[in-house]
Amino acid sequence: MKRNFAAVLCTVLLAGSLAGCGGNGSSPSQSAQETTKAAAATTETTAAAPAEMPSSDVKVKESVVVGIKAQITSMDVQSVSNVAHNIPYKLTHATLVTMNLDTGEILPDLAESWEWIDDVTIEFKLREDAKFHNGEPVTAQDVVFTFERGREGIASANKMKPATEVTAVDDHTVRMVLNAPNVDWLDTISLPVFSVLSEKALAEDPEKGYEIGAGPYVVKEFVSKDYLALTRFEDYMDGPVPTRNLTLRYIPEASARLIALQTGEIDLCQDPDTIELDTVRSDPNLTLVEFPGTTCQFFGFNCKDEVTGNKKLRQAIACAVNKQDIMDVTINGYGTIASSFWGPTQYGYIDNFETWPYDLDMAKELMKEAGLENGVDLEITVSSGARVVSAEVLQAQLKEIGVNIIINEVDSAALTSITNEARHQGLVYGLGFNTAGDEVRRVYGDGSSTNRSHYHNDRVIELMDLAVQEFDDAKRKEYYKEIQEIAKDDIPVIPLYYEQNFWGVNKNTGGVTWYGNSNVDLSTVYVTE
């Protein structure tokens, strides 16, 4: 890491961390005995404390504009699951439970409490004051509808599989029956893809009814790949938020985002270019927010492709990639080298995991074993400026072993389509990791929209299932270690680095929760005048 920044500014300037008690369930560190006790008792919960609000005598801007780096392509929470979409989904929708992504603590949201009836059955008691944007109350039937609809969603289908039965006990009680004990179930359903939808709204408007949520903001206008304009929901269950109008505006170029921030056109700028960080620091009207990230930038392969399906080729490339050089050139060294495709705060993470060495002689020998000693063409699909730079560095590095990289630069929507349909050979992309061990299912699970390598290994699938049902801490960690060792040998993905997070903001900004996985919570953002 070039520089080690503490997240001091996040605490001092921008109010943020969700606090409070609540939740139950089995955390990965609980013993089987503790988990059994937790399952036997009704959970007492209190609502999470909101981020710090401005005092009543302080005037805040009615409208706040955020410059974002990636396109928002859909407001259907069950169609896309990534950082670019999780940010707006948290603004417009609500889940049964939520999580402090830094601590892993499960907190109430639409559910005020929950109780494990047995190892595979859980009941949720819904808040009676929660309403959708159409004025309808949030009911247990809406939760049932959401899960049933989610079984067909592009981003949600794979995640819904553990819940074999979801029923409404009464208007405000939901019962879920899982196909097996699941240590991470509460973590999983805190994801935005599990946001509760209004059955009535979708019945009345199948094309756009999914925009109706129970979150703090209502969709006013959405232009796909351009901007999302929101207005405050006055009947929000936790009370109206400080900012009346909030707009997320797509500005692809980092330099253009920063200029917009400096001129006051926007109030928050996501990921200013690292070469311009001192510009933000030196501007008396701005503040630079910086904190360690859990988003891993990676070079992935399509394991179904005729060329990149060759494991020896993938191993050869792994030995020819100099990660430090890629990180230095792409983000000026503001990051941490990744050795395993695993989140640094995710359960099961292994410090100093032994990965493939940078060794050109070994790489050339593996190219021979792959039957490609005379070289090969390989197309890399990539979607944004910084990642194009990474692809160009890879292009230069892999020439050394006879791999001719062809860069296919597309927008983010096209990349999603291409990789979902396995029409790529390789890609440079990023994935933000949460805290649950079962996050690995997003990476290597069959049918997962974030398994962009279309990787399948029977033993890995078996280990994922064993791990999520295992309450013994040591055994569970061994399962996850074995997954990482198998993935190292199969190399569907070369993890490159975890990026440092940066936001440039108006100096009077407050009310933001900054999370390392980049799922920044803007629900209570405000800018004082």
Image (spheres, rainbow, N blue to C red):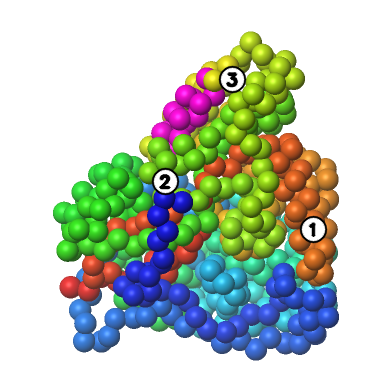
The residue at 76%/43% (across/down) is 486
Residue 310 placement, left or right of 417: right
Which of disc 3 and disc 2 is earlier in sequence? 2
Name the magenta segment's main secondary structure.
helix
The quadrant where residue 193 appears: bottom right
Residue stretch rendered in magenta on the structure? 387-399
Residue 267 x %, y %? 25, 60
The residue at 52%/20% (across/down) is 399
The quadrant where residue 119 appears: bottom right
Alpha carbon separation for disc pair 2 and 1: 32 Å
Q: Is residue 97 magenta?
A: no
Q: Amino acid at mark 1?
A: Glu
Would you place residue 126 above or below residue 358 in this image?
A: below
Disc 3 designates what residue? 401
Residue 247 x %, y %? 31, 58
- Alpha-carbon neighbours of circle 2 within 10 Å: few (<14), some, or many (≥20)? many
Disc 1 designates what residue? 478
One can see residue 87 in this view: no
Instruction: Identify the secondary structure beneath mark 2.
Output: loop
Rendered image: mark on residue 207: none
Q: Amino acid at mark 3?
A: Ile
Would you place residue 143 above or below residue 43 in this image?
A: above
Rendered image: mark on residue 333: 2
One can see residue 393 in this view: yes
Q: Nearer the viewer, mark 2 or mark 1?
A: 2
- Alpha-carbon neighbours of circle 3 within 10 Å: few (<14), some, or many (≥20)? many
Are the residues tagged 2 and 3 within 8 Å (C-beta)? no
Alpha carbon separation for disc pair 2 and 3: 25 Å
Q: Is residue 391 magenta?
A: yes
Q: Amino acid at mark 2?
A: Gly
Q: Nearer the viewer, mark 1 or mark 3?
A: 3
